Image (cartoon, coloured by chain):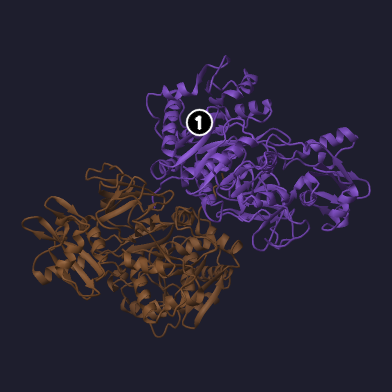
Chain colours: A purple, B brown
């Protein structure tokens, strides 16, 4: 067979030649703008040429600090097509973390959206490898960099289109850092091969089923995990992308759904909830009739939210994945639990000795995964050995697998509550709490207990008044009595990480500050910390272990 | 990323663990039998163990002469899983060709269906590398082989399951020979990688869209081009296979559609036509209501046939491919022309100097293709250099590409008719002829002409009487006058190759014998001979060049 490599440039061949006339859309401050895949490939050649002209070559590292824009999309392809490596900086991280990742990667060029320049200014003098600053928009007066150039001038100044390089498919194409809740971020390197195979897998009917007839509103940020791989899969299949641009808001997403008619929304349950609220506040003034699918990841979407979107005609689908898994590992078109493994994605659940457990929907253990698009190490990071075993990634998730291969995440290893020698799943407990109409969000941590070793404590954001006893009575209809929290804490806001996930480390810290008592896992091993999940489940009635 | 290899054993992981409970069906002489994917994987382990016990190891070559059976399916997986190479002998080839391919590959073991033993007897003494003969069924009294053993005894005698081997994905997994219309067959080697990527590609919505909810009646023979890759894709996705067993007939296909309710038929237009005739003969006694798709390949399905199946509720889909392309290269879910390239499949049309031509739906040239599942050489064959150029396979097909990337095959290079300095497409002419209600089949060759250099001659199989002048009047409504054949030859049967394709070489030979005149391309280069196409087009009104 031909040695034909699986490369990002190969995706471009199809985008240009097969789907060249298909139209994408991007929100900009000047309004909504359309561009074809042929336009995109032209952008890519311009940017590749400009990058080549300043010395970018195979192995060079190029950083972006950018929203979901046409220019960011061009960088997604232009940088790997040169054989260089794209480092998408998560601009929501703390400044010191951003600087750490840029130094860790040794980025030479930084392509930055104008409104994110304050973060760059804050890093001035601390990211010495960055020689060139390319500003999408108006650079203003920024110094401390050898070269500062507006993007439009940069790409129009290139005398020739850049030549796409033939690369070995195992060459690095992009890098993303997990924004851990503790410790410094860890870098995950994606190869050309892993990007292409992931794009193929999510395009199958066993996967997300991306195809040319669909249009995706990409609310999930392209600064993280390659935008869930959607831009690459869309280019491969000719699917339409709707990019929401800088500083997206729920209103903008609704405007784009109303005006641009995407059939699929890709984003987080939090944003989906805010969109619901905004739609209701506007007396249902948005036309959602073309929207058929809400692909929600990153955290657990409450059942009530899934029901509401279903009533609008949009089915909630979900899956399981991590930064380390590109991210999609399992997918559930029906929205139940975490779904079944994608083609070419293998998983197992192991006990403490590493022995694989039966797939009976009962036995729990640590989830381990293996696939051509699962990382095998972190970039130059001493934490690698703790996370990889015999070619499998140790996810740090506690899970069971049902006989039909349906994955059910029970908890993060460090989030389990061990009460009287029995395990309580904080995820199941949160899901059960969120089924109560008064509960908008719930987060459960373990607190030390003299009698039971640990007991669950629930933080709640409420939509309406409800007493502790009403909550316990409600939970008791589906959960064992010993699971019921002794205490509930009502808060205005549940702490979130930079990625919008519930930040249990921060809850534990606040709990410690308020009470003077440690939360249980403050002392626990942090070996599995810092993972960044794209987990979404439709909560089922907790405690049941029925198949999918 | 993990170096996780793309291997046939990886497909088995999913068949066993994710789709283990899904059911397949095979026709046997004892009736229709069901088996799950878990049963299949157990079969595979048994067969792998038995093969290992007789010394089969990495690189060993194992031949099959077999129909579409459960045992053949097990061999599809067991042989590559051992790191050995499966050579599926096309048992419809002439004996001397079969013997040539077995010797060319140096097969050590031959797994043969009992009813095909006469062919093996005919090769006795001429295939010395074959030490072991494993007979599915009753061996009877056959000698000339070191070891003759019934399949059931062979697999039950294995004391242990065979261990699947980790293989480099570029390792050979299977071999198929093209049954050329001239010359000896040429061997095409499929790697583990090419098999897996082809399975992924045909599973996407840009492809055939194989998925777990569908059931495929596999009429196309597993002895050729890996059964169009359907068994591997089905195992990957958990789709149901319905295997028609030894000596399949149109009646059996209809019985299986009636009884087993597959939604997709995979086979040739010839068989689809015979099924139609049989259904009508039986007063439409078969229930075809579950059948939604007729995936027809190998030759051109007449428009009337496609219409008839559409009236039964089954859409005809088609594509383009060759033995050398695994076979799928393009696919058309709508059944118009040859469709658009699959993901990761690249094509171009070049002029005589090798320069790529515009995709304007007008300009014709030789079709060249490139993909991870396109062969880069023939197995130990001096004809390789003529067929491959700069990493592209020269298909020998004359084609045009439309602006939307829709491929339209105009002709085989050697089948073009050059009349008065202009080209006439024999394919377009055949398609136009088959639109006439009286014409059942048509084959056009070029014959020498003193005035025009060449003129088209049409061989026709007719369903009803029609005069030459009526035919010419009919053709003139859509074709230029100079295209109209001066002569029509009415025959009872159009010559076919071993694979059921129209055999123009034989038509030219008969023409020569009958008339004493050569057909034009008898003198032409045969560099592009011997290709075995899986081409299927729905004839469009000839001469038009509209997009898909």
Q: Is residue B193 above or below residue B508?
A: above
Q: How many marks?
A: 1
Q: Where is residue A495 shown, x and y percent of the image?
A: 77, 36
Left or right, A515 with respect to B28, comes to: right
Q: Quadrant of residue A508?
A: top right
- Is B211 on the left or on the right of B544, as rendered? right
State left or right for residue B373 relative to residue B435: right
Look at the image and tell me whether residue A486 can be seen: no
Q: Residues within 10 Å of mark 1 (few under 14, many from 20)?
A: many
Query: Label 1: chain?
Result: A
Q: Which residue does the image show at 41% across and 32% down from the upper left?
A: A45
Front-lying residue, B189 or A298: A298
**Quadrant assignment for the C terminus of chain A:** bottom right
On the question of residue B312 being in view, the answer is yes
Of the pair A42 and B232, the residue shown nearer to us: A42
User: x and y percent of residue A374 in the render?
Assistant: 59, 46
- Between A298 and A25, the one lying in front of the other is A25
Image quadrant in which you'd find residue B333: bottom left
Compared with B33, A176 (above or below) is above
Q: Position of residue A494 (x, y in %)?
A: 78, 38
Q: Position of residue B442 (x, y in %)?
A: 23, 67
Point out the residue furthest to the bottom here. Answer: B141
Extreme residue toward the left, this view: B450
* Relative depth, front residue between B472 and A502: B472
Residue at disc 1, secondary structure? helix
Q: Which residue is mark 1?
A: A71
């Amino acid at each position: 067979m031909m040695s034909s490599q699986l490369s990002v440039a190969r995706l471009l061949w199809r985008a240009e030649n097969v789907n060249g006339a298909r139209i994408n859309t991007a929100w900009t401050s000047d309004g909504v703008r359309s561009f074809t895949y042929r336009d995109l490939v032209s952008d890519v050649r311009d940017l590749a040429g400009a990058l080549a002209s300043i010395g970018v070559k195979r192995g060079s590292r190029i950083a972006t600090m950018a929203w979901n824009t046409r220019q960011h999309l061009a960088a997604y392809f232009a940088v790997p097509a040169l054989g260089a490596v794209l480092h998408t900086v998560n601009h929501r991280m703390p400044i010191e973390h951003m600087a750490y990742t840029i130094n860790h990667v040794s980025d030479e060029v930084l392509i930055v959206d104008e409104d994110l320049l304050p973060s760059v200014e804050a890093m001035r003098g601390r990211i010495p490898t960055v020689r060139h600053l390319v500003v999408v928009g108006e650079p203003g007066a920024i110094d401390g960099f050898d070269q500062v150039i507006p993007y439009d001038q940069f790409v129009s100044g290139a005398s020739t289109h850049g030549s796409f390089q033939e690369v070995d498919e195992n060459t690095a194409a992009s890098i993303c850092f997990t924004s851990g809740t503790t410790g410094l971020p860890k870098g995950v390197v994606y190869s050309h091969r892993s990007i292409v195979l992931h794009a193929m897998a999510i395009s199958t009917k066993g996967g997300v089923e991306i195809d040319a007839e669909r249009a995706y509103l990409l609310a999930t940020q392209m600064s993280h995990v390659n935008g869930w791989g959607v831009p690459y899969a869309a280019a491969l299949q000719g699917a339409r992308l709707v990019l929401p641009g800088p500083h997206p808001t729920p209103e903008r997403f609704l405007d784009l759904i109303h005006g641009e008619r995407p059939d699929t929304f890709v984003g987080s349950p939090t944003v989906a909830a805010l969109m619901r609220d905004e739609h209701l506040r506007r007396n249902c003034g948005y036309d959602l009739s073309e929207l058929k699918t809400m692909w929600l990841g990153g955290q657990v979407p409450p059942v009530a939210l899934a029901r509401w979107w279903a009533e609008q005609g949009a089915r909630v689908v979900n899956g399981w994945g991590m930064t380390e898994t590109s991210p999609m590992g399992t997918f559930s078109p029906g929205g139940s639990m975490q779904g079944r493994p994608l083609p070419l994605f293998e998983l197992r659940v192991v006990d403490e000795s590493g022995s694989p457990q039966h797939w009976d929907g009962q036995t729990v253990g640590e989830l381990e995964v293996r696939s051509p698009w699962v990382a095998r190490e972190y970039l130059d990071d001493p934490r690698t050995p703790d996370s990889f075993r015999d070619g499998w990634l140790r996810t740090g998730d506690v899970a069971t697998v049902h006989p039909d291969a349906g994955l059910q995440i029970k908890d993060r290893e460090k989030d389990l509550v061990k009460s009287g020698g029995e395990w309580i799943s904080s995820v199941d407990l949160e899901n059960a709490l969120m089924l109560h109409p008064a509960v908008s969000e719930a987060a459960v941590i373990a607190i030390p207990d003299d009698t039971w070793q640990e007991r669950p404590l629930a933080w709640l954001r409420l939509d309406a008044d409800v007493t502790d006893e009403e909550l316990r009575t409600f939970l008791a209809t589906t959960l064992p009595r010993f699971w019921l929290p002794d205490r509930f804490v009502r808060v205005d806001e549940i702490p979130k990480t930079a990625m919008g996930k519930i930040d249990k480390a921060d809850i534990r810290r606040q709990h410690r500050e308020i009470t003077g008592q440690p939360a249980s896992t403050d002392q626990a091993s942090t070996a599995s910390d810092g993972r960044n999940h794209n987990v979404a489940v439709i909560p089922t009635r907790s405690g049941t272990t029925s198949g999918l």
